[in-house]
Amino acid sequence: MTIQDKLKIQTYLSVVIVVAGATHLFFGVYFALLDIPFVVLLNVFDVFVYIGAFFINKAGKTRMASFIIVFKIIVFSLMATFLFGTNVNAQWFVMVAALPAALYLDFSKFQKVCIIATMPFLISIQLFFPLLFPPPFYMYDNNLLEFLFANIIVLSFILTITLNTIITSRISDLQMQQVDEFKHMSNIDALTELSNRRHAEQFFDKLDDLPSIFCLIDIDNFKAVNDTYGHDAGDAVLSTVAGILRKNTRQTDLVCRWGGEEFLVVLPKCNSEVGHRILEKMRKTVEDETIHTDSNEIKVTITGGAAVLTDSDIKLTLSICDKNLYEGKRSGKNKIII
């Protein structure tokens, strides 16, 4: 059974328990007005049973809670018929317990078959109750009780179907939401919270033929930062640089962690002049930033190799970016080559 199925059953049981408990509370008041204290006590006892079942269900023990509810409804059916006779329709409460148990609750197939198989037997026994044991509180003119029991039976089936439909729909929505969240998380780099390489490849497919600037950016001397200050400091540097790159781009741009200390920036619908100005602003902001760690202040720079998207050839464009990045590193670092 999946987590969603367990959640569905747990939610269903919670609602059923609350409704059943409230119903027995009403009956307690009703029979108190009829001055039948024995039946009042039975209903008060039922309320406490349902309260216990509620907390058992809340603790995640859905099968135990299911058993308590089914058993309690069947006992209620038997007791009501024994006390008031068959004219109040209490014998049909067996179906209220058995059918939802077979359809929705957390029982094995064998247990469900047993529940359904005993249903006609239990109803038949109740039909013979008045012949064997005269009901102590039999009332020929208790039309209200007959009406209430009949309506509760009908409303129980309506409630069961309605709850199942609502909960199933809600579970489906939650599953779709989880799928969307998983897709989103699978496209995000956990450390920098930038897009990852997987998302970048999806982004490439959506680029049109308009001019776009690609730029590979590398943090200068990053290995020295890790060796000198430790990997926690290195992570702080990566996160800070990622934040600067993100803040200096538009929502339509791509900023992703390409690998290690290397980032890729893509500026769609952007010519080389504007692109160079944006990338230079990023470089200067990183150069001016002081990164504070637990006991150190770290300064870093970045070098970028940029190129205009050539003939919609992503691979060729990235190759040009890589060559320009190498040239920037070779010629002194802390610069953007385009």
Image: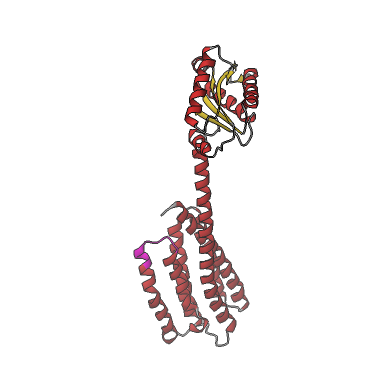
The answer to which of 259 and 325 lies nearer the viewer is 325
Task: Quarter of the image for the C terminus: give it.
Answer: top right
The picture quadrant where one finds residue 129 is bottom left
The percent coordinates of residue 280 (x first, y second) are 63, 21
The percent coordinates of residue 27 (x first, y second) are 58, 73
The percent coordinates of residue 196 (x first, y second) are 51, 33
Residue drawn at 52 percent across, 44 percent down: 181
Judged from this view, the residue extending furthest toward the left is 110
Residue drawn at 48 percent across, 74 percent down: 93
The percent coordinates of residue 79 (x first, y second) are 47, 75
Residue drawn at 45 percent across, 71 percent down: 74
Task: Quarter of the image for the N terminus: give it.
Answer: bottom left
The answer to which of 138 and 312 lies nearer the viewer is 312
Task: Determine if residue 259 is in view.
Answer: no
Q: How many marks?
A: 0
Image: 50 above or below 143: above
Q: Is residue 330 magenta?
A: no
Q: Is residue 139 left or right of residue 126?
A: right
Q: Is residue 147 left or right of residue 63?
A: right
The picture quadrant where one finds residue 29 is bottom right
Which contiguous range is marked in magenta? 104-112
